[in-house]
Image (cartoon, grey):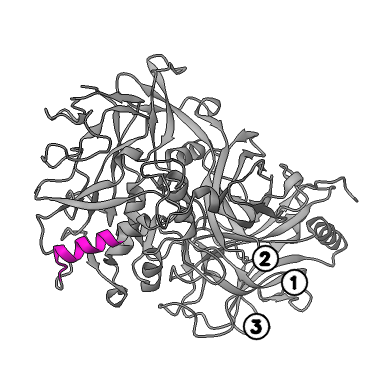
């Protein structure tokens, strides 16, 4: 019997949110301690972080339906789902993944179990509506995987239950002895191989959920959710996919990937969309289980399949922190369609490792150089032309703890604090002339576009606000405008006597309904004055920069980058010096037409800071003709600047 070769991977929880939709995808992780390589800490070994996945010999992955609850409990009362209806729905969700023509994953319900205990490590891949009393998520999909390379021999008892789990008489995992659990073919298996996966759905009376079926039964009740939406997400985890940061496809679509870690149970349109795979989901399932990569077995092409290499190409590169001069672990790297601007697929950067105690099994940080080996990334995308960008996994719209250990390592070393930007080829530097510039990247099937390397820019933000305490406002009418003042003295104090580049303006935005993209009528940078009565006059007729149809990011900052930041910087600094510019005002206008989109009928919102009120936030309900000081909140708008990338005056 082999000991300590498995690990439970618990990063697979789906939690609810009233509306939390920005960008990414990749693999759930476990440890690889093969070889017991010593770490710098005495009594410790190196634990490399690797992705988890099923071995081809375990495909099709066989699941057993727990039949001990029929009908399915409903904490909100009638109506109740029958077990048969629930099982049929779960297979439909499996088939969302099974039917990807470029992925050879195959997950099936092939049996049943009448267990009245909780699911666990027993080589029964169980689907159950039983959860522990402490369980609070909607659902989860914990997997047990190898943490060392291992060779299974005939008769091995891997889980220690006294029953053999390995047979040399089979070539595919199956229940050889008809006792309900799975036996594995003898042979070599790599660290990260999934051995057991259970999926549990929370129906407890105290904090459980009502599971419904079909679009007609979706509602806006917080603790009511579509079963297929939840199951399709969890079954992504079941075959190794991590959470995605993709919560917003583009200007015409607020929906994102099925694997985004939150679900808006108050928005039926968002639930319906999340039940169907996005390109990000399809890309990663195909990358980990690529069709056409073997001459026989599950990966061999069959009727209806398409070879991964005939559809997908790869974008690869590395992300480095321009200020810290370090490779970044856990940066979100995303590819958007060059023409539409829609998010297509994304990934995370970094190869990482931890130090593992031989005595306790605990995992430890050592230092940045040890824990973060590189900042490399890969993104699988279909044929097309793309722009590639990066953003931090900094809590908006999801935190590092929602994604992976690699993201958490990057956060621990203070790396998730860089500005969102696009790749701009040779201009990548810690000091860039135009942070918002992007370069086109053509992708052909079967080809890899290498060297899409990022160096995060060193920026300076003037932010007259604190932490986000609220979003708002309520009762906002069409065309309502928000503004925040940036006094000229704040700009003059930055890099005094030298040029400064005004790169853009950034807005903390949000929507009530996850299916709706936060599109604002206009975003503007303008000059203006403060009047004696604490009102303001903003010169919207002669803006310094303006754009219509500004696309925010749901529960995140979105930046309007300028085309000539150095020219604008010199103009503003000159105006401050001669007194013609006293203040800059960052202005954001909600849509001018009602009704607002979405089931809630609410406009897109902005982030509001509480705490000490700085007196720099203003509102207008008449198109900017008059403005009133807001004494309740600080609007979370920023002016984004940088030092010049060229000598002054050039």
- Crowding at dot 1, Cα within 10 Å, few <14 / some 14-19 / many 20+, comes out as many
> What residue is drawn where x is 35% and y is 70%?
266
**In terms of secondary structure, where does tag 3 sit?**
loop
- N-term mark: 2 or 1: 2
Q: Which residue is mark 1?
A: 528
Task: Using the numbered discs, state the Cα–Cα distance from disc 3 to disc 2 in whole angstroms.
Answer: 17 Å
User: Is residue 95 placed above or below 122 in the rendered structure?
Assistant: below
Residue 400 visible in image: no
Q: Which residue is mark 2?
A: 485
Q: Which residue is mark 3?
A: 623
**In terms of secondary structure, where does tag 2 sit?**
strand
- N-term mark: 3 or 1: 1
Q: In what quadrant of the picture does the N terminus appear?
A: top left
Residue 419: percent from the left, percent from the top? Answer: 62, 50
- N-term mark: 3 or 2: 2
Q: Which residues are magenta?
A: 80-92
Left or right side of 204 for 239 = right
Residue 1 visible in image: yes
- Crowding at dot 3, Cα within 10 Å, few <14 / some 14-19 / many 20+, comes out as some
């Amino acid at each position: 019997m082999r000991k300590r070769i498995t690990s439970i991977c618990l990063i697979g929880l789906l939690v609810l949110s009233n509306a939390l939709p920005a960008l990414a995808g990749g693999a759930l992780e476990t440890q690889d301690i093969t070889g017991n390589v010593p770490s710098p800490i005495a009594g410790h070994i190196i634990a490399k972080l690797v992705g988890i996945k099923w071995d081809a010999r375990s495909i099709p992955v066989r699941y057993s339906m727990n039949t001990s609850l029929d009908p399915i409990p409903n904490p909100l009362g009638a109506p109740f789902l029958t077990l048969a209806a629930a099982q049929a729905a779960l297979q439909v969700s499996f088939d969302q993944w099974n039917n990807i023509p470029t992925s050879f994953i195959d997950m099936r319900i092939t049996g049943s179990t009448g267990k009245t205990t909780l699911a666990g490590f027993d080589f029964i891949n169980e689907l159950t509506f039983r959860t522990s009393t402490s369980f609070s998520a909607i659902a989860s999909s914990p997997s047990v995987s190898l943490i060392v390379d291992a060779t299974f021999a005939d008769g091995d008892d891997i889980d220690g239950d006294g029953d053999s789990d390995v047979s040399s008489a089979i070539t595919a995992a199956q229940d050889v002895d008809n006792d309900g659990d799975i036996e594995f073919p003898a042979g070599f298996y790599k660290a990260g191989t999934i051995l057991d996966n259970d999926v549990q759905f929370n129906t407890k009376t105290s904090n459980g959920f009502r599971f419904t079926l079909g679009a007609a039964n979706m509602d806006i009740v917080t603790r009511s959710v579509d079963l297929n939406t939840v199951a399709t997400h969890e079954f992504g985890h079941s075959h190794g996919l991590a959470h995605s940061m993709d919560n917003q496809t583009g200007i015409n679509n607020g929906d994102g990937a099925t694997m985004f870690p939150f679900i808006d149970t108050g928005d039926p349109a968002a639930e319906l969309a999340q039940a169907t795979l996005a390109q990000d989901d399809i890309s990663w399932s195909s990358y980990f289980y690529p069709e056409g990569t073997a001459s026989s077995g599950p990966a061999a092409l069959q009727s209806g399949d398409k070879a991964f290499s005939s559809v997908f190409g790869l974008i690869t590169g590395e992300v480095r922190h321009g200020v810290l001069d370090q490779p970044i672990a856990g940066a979100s790297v995303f590819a958007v369609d060059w023409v539409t601007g829609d998010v297509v697929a994304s990934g995370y950067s970094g190869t990482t490792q931890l130090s593992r105690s031989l005595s306790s099994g605990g995992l430890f940080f050592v230092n940045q150089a040890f824990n973060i080996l590189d900042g490399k990334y890969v993104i699988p995308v279909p044929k097309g032309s793309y722009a590639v960008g990066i953003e931090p996994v900094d809590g908006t719209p999801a935190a590092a703890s929602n994604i992976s250990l690699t993201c958490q390592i990057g956060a621990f070393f203070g790396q998730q604090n860089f500005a969102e930007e696009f790749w701009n080829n040779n201009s990548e530097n810690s000091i860039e002339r135009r942070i918002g510039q992007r370069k086109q990247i053509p992708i052909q099937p079967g080809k890899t576009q290498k060297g899409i390397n990022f160096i995060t820019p060193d920026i300076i933000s003037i932010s007259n606000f604190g932490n986000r305490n609220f979003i708002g406002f309520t009762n906002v009418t069409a065309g309502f405008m928000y503004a925040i003042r940036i006094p000229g003295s704040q700009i003059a104090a930055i890099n005094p006597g030298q040029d400064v580049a005004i790169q853009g303006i950034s807005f903390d935005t949000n929507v009530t309904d996850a299916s709706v993209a936060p599109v604002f009528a206009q975003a503007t940078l303008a000059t203006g004055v403060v009047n004696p009565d604490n009102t303001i006059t903003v010169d919207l007729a002669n803006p310094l920069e303006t754009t219509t149809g500004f696309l925010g990011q749901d529960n995140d900052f979105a930046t309007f980058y300028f085309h000539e930041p150095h020219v604008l910087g010199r103009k503003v600094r000159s105006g401050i010096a001669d007194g013609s510019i006293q203040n800059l005002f960052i202005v954001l206008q909600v849509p001018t037409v009602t009704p607002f989109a979405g089931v809630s009928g609410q406009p897109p919102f902005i982030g509001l800071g509480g705490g000490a009120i700085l007196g720099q936030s203003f509102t207008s309900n008449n198109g900017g003709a008059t403005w009133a000081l807001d004494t309740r909140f600080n609007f979370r708008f920023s002016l984004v600047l940088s030092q010049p990338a060229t000598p002054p005056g050039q």
